[in-house]
Image (tube, rainbow, N blue to C red):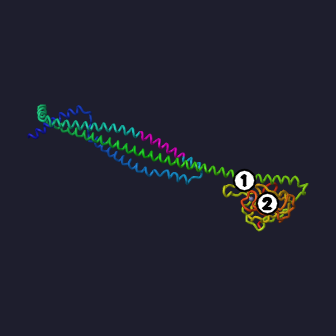
């Protein structure tokens, strides 16, 4: 009997303190639903943190993408300039990505600061509640018997007294739930903060990766631009060589044309009108039929460009006899920087043959020569890279294919 009375007494005292608590604490609707909602949110947060951690790990794999971009571009590189343009576009994209990341990181930092403040508040709520409960418990033990008597005397009947006890039970439960809720809030906000911090770390690492990607791209662009420069320099050099070659041919042609003009002017007075009767020419470098360079357009082996070759090059050792391909009159037998020692023969009817790079000339201008007669020896004078006979045929003021007049013996 004494124990149960004491129990009622304690409950009575508790009732007073809880009433006091209800008045002094902020209004809070504590329910089992609120706590289970919080628990669900906490679980959600834990899953989100796991996902963010996973994303962080996957970042390392993303770092190889620069190498992949490089490989892809190398594969499709048809033109270096287009290639560099693609790289520039890739860098611009990365820069935009970095800017976006900076914004996201700033937002994240703000959210973290806010969550920190929220956490501090939640922790304070929990501490306050805990302290209030502790105080109430302490007072119950300190002030024991007097409060039981007061509660008993305040109750109008025994039923009233029991009702009050029931209410006290509920309030005690409420107090406990409130503490649990505050604990849950602290746990939830703390998880929010952790999640934000992990997300921020992911953003920082993404930014770092993007910056590394940008640096790699820029190095690549530097390399490609150097390649373009080298390539352009090479093209310029080739163009210069081609221009020099073309100037040389033009110079040769102007010499030949001047001679043709002179022949045309002097023909009547010097040797009368000559008529070519259509006969086949003889092979001008007997027993040497290897053609080292044919008449017409050919691909320059080093420059890789098309150039026009005005005659047929016959490879033959130095000193090999050069024969007049057909009957005619020697128009010129002289030295020229480009043609070397050369002979030009007029066969009549605006048909001429020219023999270049000779070692020795054996005829003079005005000499009548017969088909097959030796006029010079093979050499490598003028612009020539080795012993050979360059044999050209001109008709009506233009180079024509010698193959219309000669055939390999
Ligand atoms: Zn030639």
Q: Mostly what secondary structure, the magenta segment? A: helix
Q: Is residue 163 in view from this perspective?
A: no
Q: Is mark 2 within 8 Å of ligand 1?
A: no
Q: Report x, y in % for residue 41.
A: 32, 43
Image side of residue 311 versus residue 120, left or right: right
Ligand 1 quadrant in view: bottom right
Residue lying furthest left = 1
How far apart, in angstroms, are the residues tagged by discs 2 and 1? 19 Å
The residue positioned 57% from the left and 52% from the top of the image is 77
Callout 1 crowding tier (Cα within 10 Å): few <14, some 14–19, many ≥20: some
Which region is colored magenta? 88-106
Q: Report x, y in % for residue 362.
A: 83, 62
- Please tell me whether residue 66 is drawn above or below residue 319 in the rendered image: above
Nearest the eye: 363 or 409: 363
Quadrant in the picture for the C terminus: bottom right
Give the quarter of the image for residue 133. top left
Image side of residue 43 versus residue 89, left or right: left
Residue occupied by mark 2 = 355
Q: Earlier in the sequence, mark 2 or mark 1?
A: 1
- Please tell me whether residue 114 is drawn above or below residue 345 in the rendered image: above
Which secondary structure lies at badge 2?
A: strand
* The magenta stretch spans residue 40: no
Residue occupied by mark 1 = 245
- Please tell me whether residue 262 is drawn above or below residue 13 in the rendered image: below
Give the quarter of the image for residue 263. bottom right
The residue positioned 82% from the left and 55% from the top of the image is 396
Nearest the eye: 345 or 75: 345
Image side of residue 234 versus residue 197, left or right: right
Which secondary structure lies at badge 1?
A: helix
Nearest the eye: 258 or 192: 258
């Amino acid at each position: 009997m004494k124990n149960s009375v004491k129990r009622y007494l304690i409950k009575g005292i508790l009732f007073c303190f809880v009433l006091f608590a209800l008045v002094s604490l902020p209004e809070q609707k504590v329910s089992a639903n609120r706590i289970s909602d919080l628990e669900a949110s906490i679980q959600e947060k834990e899953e989100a943190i796991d996902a963010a951690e996973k994303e962080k790990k996957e970042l390392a794999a993303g770092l190889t993408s620069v190498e992949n971009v490089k490989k892809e571009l190398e594969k499709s590189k048809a033109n270096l300039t287009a290639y560099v343009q693609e790289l520039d576009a890739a860098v611009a994209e990365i820069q935009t990505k970095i800017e976006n990341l900076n914004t996201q990181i700033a937002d994240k930092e703000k959210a973290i600061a806010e969550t920190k403040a929220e956490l501090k508040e939640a922790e304070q709520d929990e501490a306050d509640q805990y302290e209030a409960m502790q105080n109430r418990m302490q007072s119950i033990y300190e002030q024991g018997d007097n409060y039981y008597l007061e509660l008993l005397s305040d109750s109008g009947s025994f039923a009233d007294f029991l009702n009050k006890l029931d209410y006290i039970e509920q309030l005690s439960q409420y107090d406990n739930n409130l503490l649990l809720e505050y604990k849950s809030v602290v746990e939830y906000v703390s998880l929010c903060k952790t999640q934000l911090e992990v997300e921020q770390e992911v953003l920082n690492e993404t930014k770092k990766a993007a910056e590394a990607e940008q640096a790699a791209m820029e190095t690549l662009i530097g390399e490609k631009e150097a390649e373009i420069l080298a390539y352009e320099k090479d093209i310029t050099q080739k163009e210069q060589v081609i221009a020099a070659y073309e100037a040389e041919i033009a110079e040769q042609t102007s010499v030949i044309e001047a001679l043709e003009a002179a022949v045309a002017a002097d023909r009547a007075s010097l040797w009368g009108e000559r008529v070519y009767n259509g006969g086949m020419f003889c092979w001008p470098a007997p027993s040497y039929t290897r053609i080292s360079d044919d008449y017409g357009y050919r691909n320059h082996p080093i420059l890789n460009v098309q150039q026009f070759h005005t005659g047929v090059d016959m490879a033959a050792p130095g000193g090999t006899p050069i024969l007049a391909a057909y009957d005619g009159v020697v128009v010129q037998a002289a030295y020229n920087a480009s043609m070397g020692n050369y002979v030009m023969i007029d066969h009549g009817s605006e048909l001429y043959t020219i023999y270049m790079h000779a070692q020795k000339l054996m005829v003079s201008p005005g000499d009548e020569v017969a088909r097959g007669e030796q006029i010079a020896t093979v050499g490598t004078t003028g612009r020539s890279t080795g012993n050979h006979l360059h044999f050209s045929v001109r008709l009506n003021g233009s180079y024509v294919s010698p193959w219309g007049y000669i055939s390999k013996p």
